[in-house]
Image: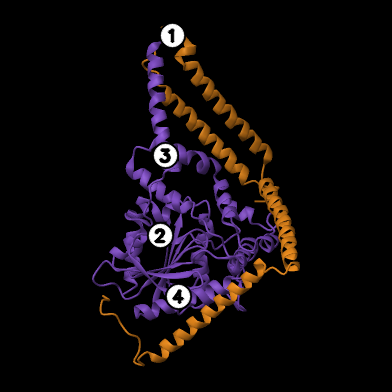
Chain colours: A orange, B purple
């Protein structure tokens, strides 16, 4: 989605509409509340506060989801998140390099050293696996592939 | 003032307090242990962090062509075998399919240089050879899920004679369609080189927070409200906890393969444009000739359906089928609807082609 194709005016309008709908639902809920409505004279048996709250919650959930999902899908959000990730990457790289340099100067083994070592072990394991396969191939009977008796 | 109303409100508040305490206890304070990935299996091959699992058959005779499941590099593969009754593996085994699964393991910092070449040309190739030798079959079927599907498609294009049947599940192919991840990962928004240079591997928290923010209200509010409302439903709680365990069991992604995925696929769409090179060899989807089933989740927010739909047009296979199923990205493998309504059909499709 390009920056040009994302209509921010439309997005903010939707944001306002969602807020307005949720607020009017809340006001409606408040108005129907017997405590507010008519104190002692209120007919309360048909008033279910839980169902009323659930209705309000559903409205809030639906409108907020729509608005927020649209927002995280906007080019502006993507660009800002990208910028934040970029800056944190720059800081991390600078910090890690400083630590690595300090440790090296003190002749301590660093993380890069252990990574290199572990990587060599992994390569060695891969070579052993290849050799095992070669030995298996050589020791296999030459007459085609074996078949399992349990196959249909 | 109406005492009726106050009584009712007080009773509801008391009930809600009890439910809330129970929900907190179950979800946070003392979550019961949930058994995941429980289908009996043995590990028949390991290399670095990779494990190749072979599930014990549950019928006397299995069909001759085994199936290898290749999961994404994000999160753990036991979503395909979440718990008894919620397991794709279980459905396939019960139908007589011989099932293997790649568990990529959790990459360490020393694995940051592993790229597509290593995953496709080394790991997947090695696993396919292992399965052939273990099963005694010269042919295999492959089921690739999400990123695992994209890599399976790459493998099938590079080694067309190696795979008899290919099943893709929510596999991203075309990355220039509208979608949140496609937007976030696009060139002007994400400097992947800088990111990988700094972090080495992709931290699991980075991916997890990204997934959460794709649907913030659903993931951070609605899910827990729904749990609270169903906290007295034992089956619901059990499924919820198993899913939570999987969702929070995040692993890093090897830096180089992530960089290549973002750069070559999300940013340059090289797979669709036929420009993707792995170890000097062009990955041409037209080279895929095997039988193909393409499973797409209609409400997928991670891999938009349009991203996978194009696959059928790009391959040369004559025997191909696309199913757009009404579920989400994860629901395709764990929802009771798909386990009853989709997977037995997928198994039958495979069986037809595994004799």
Quadrant holding the C terminus of chain B: bottom left
| Residue farthest left in this picture | B60
**For this view, does A43 lie left or right of residue A24?**
left
Residue holding disc 1: B1
Rendered image: mark on residue B127: 4
Nearer the observer: mark 4 or 3; the answer is 3
Nearer the observer: mark 3 or 1; the answer is 3
**Cβ atoms at labels 1 and 4 below 8 Å apart:** no
Within the image, what quadrant is residue A17 found in?
A: top right
Give the alpha-carbon distance from disc 4 to disc 3, as whole Å.
43 Å
Quick check: do tags 2 and 3 share a chain?
yes
Residue B4 point in image, percent of width and height: 37, 13
**For this view, does B340 lie left or right of residue A36?**
left
Q: Chain of mark 4?
A: B
**Of the image marks 2 and 3, the number of the one nearer the N terminus:** 3
Quick check: do tags 1 and 4 share a chain?
yes
Residue B34 point in image, percent of width and height: 38, 51
Rendered image: mark on residue B80: 2
Q: Chain of mark 3?
A: B
Residue B235, can we see it? Answer: yes
Residue displayed at 41% across by 38% down: B23
Residues packed near mark 3 inside 10 Å, few (<14), some (14 to 19) or many (20 plus): few
Give the alpha-carbon distance from disc 2 to disc 3, as whole Å.
28 Å
Q: Eyeballing the image, is B193 above or below B34?
A: below
Q: Eyeballing the image, is B344 above or below B226?
A: below
Residue holding disc 3: B25
Residue B266 point in image, percent of width and height: 62, 61
**Cβ atoms at labels 2 and 3 below 8 Å apart:** no
Nearer the observer: mark 2 or 3; the answer is 3
**Cβ atoms at labels 3 and 1 below 8 Å apart:** no
Within the image, what quadrant is residue B263 found in?
A: bottom right
**Of the image marks 4 and 2, the number of the one nearer the N terminus:** 2
């Amino acid at each position: 989605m390009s920056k040009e194709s994302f209509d921010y005016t439309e997005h903010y309008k939707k944001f306002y509409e969602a807020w307005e709908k949720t607020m009017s639902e809340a006001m409606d809920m408040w108005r129907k509340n017997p405590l507010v409505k008519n104190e002692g004279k209120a007919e309360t048996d048909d008033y279910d506060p839980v169902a009323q709250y659930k209705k309000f919650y559903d409205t809030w959930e639906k409108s907020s989801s729509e608005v927020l999902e649209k927002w995280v899908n906007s080019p502006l959000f993507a660009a800002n998140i990208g910028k934040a990730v970029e800056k944190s990457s720059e800081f991390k790289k600078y910090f890690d390099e400083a630590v690595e340099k300090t440790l090296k100067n003190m002749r301590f083994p660093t993380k890069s050293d252990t990574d290199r070592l572990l990587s060599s072990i992994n390569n060695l394991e891969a070579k052993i696996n290849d050799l095992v396969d070669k030995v298996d191939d050589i020791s296999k009977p030459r007459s085609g592939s074996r078949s399992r008796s349990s196959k249909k | 003032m109406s005492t009726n109303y106050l009584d009712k409100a007080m009773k509801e508040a008391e009930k809600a307090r009890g439910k809330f305490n129970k929900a907190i206890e179950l979800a946070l304070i003392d979550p019961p242990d949930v058994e995941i990935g429980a289908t009996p299996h043995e590990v028949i091959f390991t290399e670095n962090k990779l494990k190749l699992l072979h599930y014990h058959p549950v019928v006397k005779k299995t069909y001759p062509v085994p199936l290898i499941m290749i999961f994404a590099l994000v999160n753990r593969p036991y979503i395909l075998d979440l718990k008894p009754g919620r397991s794709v593996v279980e459905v396939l085994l019960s139908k007589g399919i011989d099932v293997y699964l790649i568990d990529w393991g959790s990459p360490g910092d020393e694995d940051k240089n592993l790229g597509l070449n290593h995953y496709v040309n080394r790991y997947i190739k090695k696993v396919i050879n292992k399965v052939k030798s273990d099963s005694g079959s010269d042919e295999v079927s492959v089921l690739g899920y999400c990123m695992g599907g994209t890599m399976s498609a790459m493998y099938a294009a590079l080694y067309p004679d190696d795979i008899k049947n290919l099943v893709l599940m929510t596999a991203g192919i075309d990355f220039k369609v509208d979608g949140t991840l496609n937007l976030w990962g696009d060139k002007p928004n994400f400097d992947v080189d800088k990111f990988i240079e700094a972090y080495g591997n992709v931290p699991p928290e980075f991916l997890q927070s990204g997934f959460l923010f794709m649907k913030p209200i659903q993931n951070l509010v609605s899910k827990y409200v729904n749990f609270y409302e169903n906290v007295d439903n034992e089956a619901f709680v059990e499924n919820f906890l198993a899913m939570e365990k999987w969702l929070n069991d995040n692993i890093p992604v090897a830096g180089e393969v992530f960089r290549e995925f973002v750069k070559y696929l999300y940013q340059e769409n090289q797979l669709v444009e036929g420009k993707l090179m792995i170890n000097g060899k062009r990955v041409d989807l037209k080279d895929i000739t095997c039988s193909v089933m393409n499973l797409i989740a209609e409400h997928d927010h991670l891999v938009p359906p349009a991203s996978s739909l194009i696959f059928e047009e790009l391959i040369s296979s004559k025997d191909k089928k696309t199913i757009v199923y009404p579920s989400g990205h994860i629901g395709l493998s764990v929802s009771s609807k798909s386990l009853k309504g989709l997977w037995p059909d997928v198994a039958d499709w495979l069986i037809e082609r595994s004799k």
